[in-house]
């Protein structure tokens, strides 16, 4: 892995930890039994554009941020699904898929995993699939829009390499 990738992983991981710690109350949405911290997926989604290893590292950092915040274990378990969808998205991008398409294709992976991981915590089918699954679908969509805007800005600033195809 290149030094630039290691630094990028470190910076994005720092953001992935800081967002739930500092902004969880301000950017947090709670519709029991669902909760979301707007922008918490942005570092993970941006990491997908770097490479699969960076995506995994930042995804783990995201889960760590929710753990350090002292969130209930069910929320930490949901955040522990971030490395999985991030790795999948990074692999898609590595194979030539655009950033935008990777965000779209990882949406059902992300929502499905978060819906499944809450079931051992006593969530019924409705709460797991509809409330958490659809809630994650909406949350992923909002964070995808934010991520796309930041991604395009990073390309314009020549911080991220332009992949040479439509984002």
Image: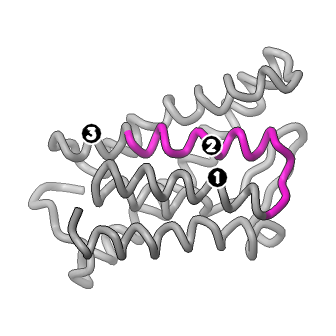
Query: Total marks drawn?
Result: 3
Would residue 127 appear left or right of 129 to someone viewing this image?
right
* Spot occupied by residue 117 in the image (x, y as percentages of width and height): 69, 27
Query: Residue 144's x, y, as percent?
Result: 48, 54
Q: How is the image coloured?
A: one colour
Where is the N terminus found, in terms of image quarters?
A: bottom left
Residue nearer the viewer, 30 or 88 = 88
In the figure, is residue 63 to the left or right of 5? right
Q: Where does the C terminus fall, quadrant-wise? A: bottom left
Name of the residue lying farthest toward the bottom: 157
Residue tagged by mark 3? 92
Question: Which numbered circle lies on residue 80?
Answer: 2
- Which region of the structure is painted magenta? 69-87
Q: Report x, y in % for residue 126.
A: 81, 18
First along the sequence among labels 1 and 3: 1
| Callouts 1 and 2 close, C-beta under 8 Å | yes
Residue 27, percent from left and from top: 74, 67
Q: Secondary structure at mark 3?
A: helix
Task: Determine the CA span between mark 1 and mark 2.
Answer: 5 Å
Give whichever of 23, 18 is nearer the camera: 18
Label 1 sits on residue: 63
Cα separation between marks 1 and 3: 22 Å
Which mark sits nearer the N-terminus, 3 or 2?
2
Rounded to the nearest angstrom, the CA distance separating label 3 from label 2 is 20 Å
Residue under the point 65% across and 33% down: 114
């Amino acid at each position: 892995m290149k030094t630039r990738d290691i630094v990028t992983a470190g910076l994005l991981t720092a953001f992935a930890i800081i967002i739930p710690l500092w902004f969880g109350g301000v950017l947090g949405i709670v519709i029991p039994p669902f909760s979301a911290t707007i922008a918490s997926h942005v570092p993970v989604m941006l990491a997908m554009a770097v490479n699969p290893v960076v995506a995994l590292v930042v995804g783990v950092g995201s889960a760590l941020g929710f753990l350090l915040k002292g969130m209930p274990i069910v929320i930490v378990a949901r955040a522990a699904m971030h490395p999985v969808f991030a790795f999948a998205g990074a692999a898609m991008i590595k194979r030539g898929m655009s950033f935008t398409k990777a965000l779209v294709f990882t949406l059902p992976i992300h929502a499905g995993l978060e819906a499944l991981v809450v079931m051992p915590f006593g969530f019924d089918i409705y709460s797991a699939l509809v409330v958490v699954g659809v809630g994650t679908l909406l949350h992923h969509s909002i964070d995808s829009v934010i991520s796309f805007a930041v991604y395009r800005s990073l390309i314009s600033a020549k911080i991220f390499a332009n992949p040479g195809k439509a984002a």
